[in-house]
Amino acid sequence: MKAEDISSILGVSHRTALYHLTILKDYDLVEVRKFNRRGFRLFRSVWGLKNDKSIQRIFDIILSKYTEDELREIIKKNIASKKSSSRKKTAAYII
C-alpha cells in the first residue's frame, strides 16, 4: 500500500504513517517495495509486509488483549476524533 492510503484508512497524517512505517521497518516487519524518483531524490512509494512469523506473533498478542469488534470500535473512535479535532486525543488513540 501507499503511505497515503495507510494514513487515510487509519485517520492519521501522512507524516505519522511514515514515522510508524519507519519504526516497523527498523524491526524488519515491513519493507519498501517501490521507490519513485523526483529529481535526484528517491521517495518511498509502496510499502508491504514482510513474510515473517513475528508479524503473526504481534497479531496474536493484540488479539489476546482485544476482540475483533473492540479493535474495530477503537479504530472508528480514532478516526472520528481525527475528524472532529486534529489535536484532541481519545483514550482509544493508543492501543
Image (cartoon, rainbow, N blue to C red):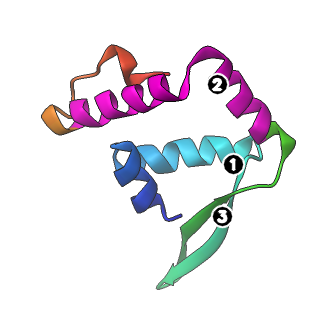
Residue in view at x 83 percent, y 48 percent: 52
Amino acid type at mark 1: Lys
As drawn, the residue found furthest toward the bottom would be 39
Camera-near label (3 vs 2) is: 2
Up the image or down, 44 lies above or below 65; here it is below
Give me the residue at 39% from left, 50% from top. 9
Tag 2 residue: 63
- Write the start and end of the magenta stretch as one range: 55-82
Q: Label for residue 25?
A: 1
Horizontal relation, residue 58 to residue 21: left or right: right
**Residue 67 is covered by the magenta coloring:** yes
Type of residue at label 3? Val
Q: CA distance from mark 1 to mark 2?
A: 22 Å
Most common SS among magenta residues: helix
**If you read the primary sequence from the N terminus, does the residue marked by circle 1 or circle 2 appear first?**
1
Q: Position of residue 7 (x, y in %)?
A: 40, 51
Q: Is residue 9 visible?
A: yes
Q: Is residue 47 above or below residue 59?
A: below
Residue 62, x across and y down, in percent:
64, 24
Tell me which corner region of the image, top left, top right, bottom left or bottom right, holds residue 79. Answer: top left
| SS state under label 3 | strand
Badge 1 crowding class, 10 Å Cα cut-off, few under 14, some 14 to 19, many 20 or more, is some
Which secondary structure lies at badge 2? helix
Q: Nearer the viewer, residue 52 or 86?
A: 52
Question: Looking at the image, do the residues carrying marks 1 and 3 touch, with CB atoms under 8 Å apart?
Answer: yes
- Label 3, on which residue? 32
Task: State the SS at label 1.
Answer: helix
